[in-house]
Amino acid sequence: MFFVTGTDTDVGKTLISAGLLLAARKYSDNCIGIKPVSVGCETTPDGLRNDDALELMQASSVELDYDEANPVALKQAVAPHIAVQLAGGTIDLEFLVRHCQALDEKYPGFTLIEGAGGWRVPLNEHQFISDLPARLNMPVIMVVAMRLGCISHAILTAETIRRDGLEIAGWVANSISEEMPYHGENLLMLEKKIKAPLLGCVPFLEQVSAESVAAHLNPGSLFQGN
């Protein structure tokens, strides 16, 4: 199991996760993506549905039930601890831990657990989304949005992940806009400072899809030693 986090919200975690799931199929038969907590869900005849969770389901090599892919779905597009309060509920970290463990055991292979927003997003007054990978001792994949400020955001996120006692298994540089001044220079500094395998450098894509992203990713290092 790997936990996918971002240096902020809207950095392309889901798209990169979906691309990794497709690229990983050459290494594993079972490749599944899970979005334990989602916000901004739409009401459908089948219940609340989240676009990110649906995208992960589509990229998975195993057909998951929606509740398997996204056990906590919240309607309001705000921070999870606020969204769940508005829904009149709570988020149980231990439930999320058991859920992820059960799916990993049910479908042994390559499992990606996508976080919500950045590393320190609150689930409630006392717990963060980062407590989930910490409880499961999961290696982390970090998605860095290539934009102004990315170096500081990436270094701070990497430092915090390691301070929490977790390994950074790899990172992805994701170009979310058509032009970034001194892209190469920023990328070089990130490679020097993050000190983890670069799994891919995804350029700005006119036609965005999990397939087009997968073409720029190499998850091979994630399977070394397995």
Image (cartoon, grey):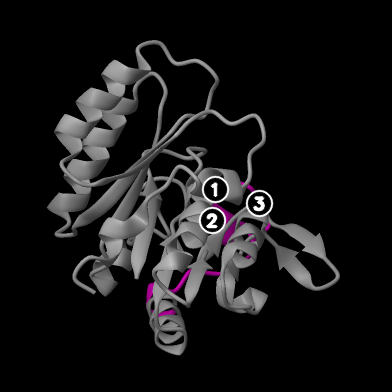
The boundaries of the magenta stretch are 75-95
- Mark 1 crowd level (few <14, some 14–19, many ≥20, 10 Å Cα): many
Residue 175 lies, with reference to residue 48, above or below; the image says above
The residue located at (77%, 71%) in the rendering is 47
Residue at point 29% right, 61% down? 222
Labels 3, 2: front one: 2
Which residue, as the protein is rendered here, is positioned at the far front? 26
Q: Quadrant of residue 137?
A: bottom left
Residue extending farthest right? 45
Q: Which residue is mark 2?
A: 18
Which of these two is toward me, 117 or 181?
A: 181
Instruction: Please name the amino acid that badge 3 sits on.
Output: Gly
- Look at the picture and state if 59 lies above or below 216: below
Relative image position of residue 22 (x, y in whole percent): 52, 60
Q: Is residue 204 left or right of residue 171?
A: right
- Mark 2 falls on what kind of element? helix
Q: Is residue 92 magenta?
A: yes
Q: Quadrant of residue 155?
A: top left
Quickly name the residue at label 1.
15
- Apparent side of residue 135 relative to residue 39 in the rendered image (left or right): left
The tag earlier along the polypeptide, 3 or 2, is 2
Contact check, label 1 and label 3, Cβ < 8 Å: no
173 left or right, relative to 226: right
User: How far apart in space, not on screen, are marks 3 and 2 (Cα)?
Assistant: 19 Å
Circle 3 residue: 40
> How many marks are shown on the rendered structure?
3
Task: Answer above or below: position of 205 versus 165.
Answer: above
Please report contact status of discs 2 and 1: CB closer than 8 Å, yes or no.
Answer: yes
Mark 2: amino acid: Ala
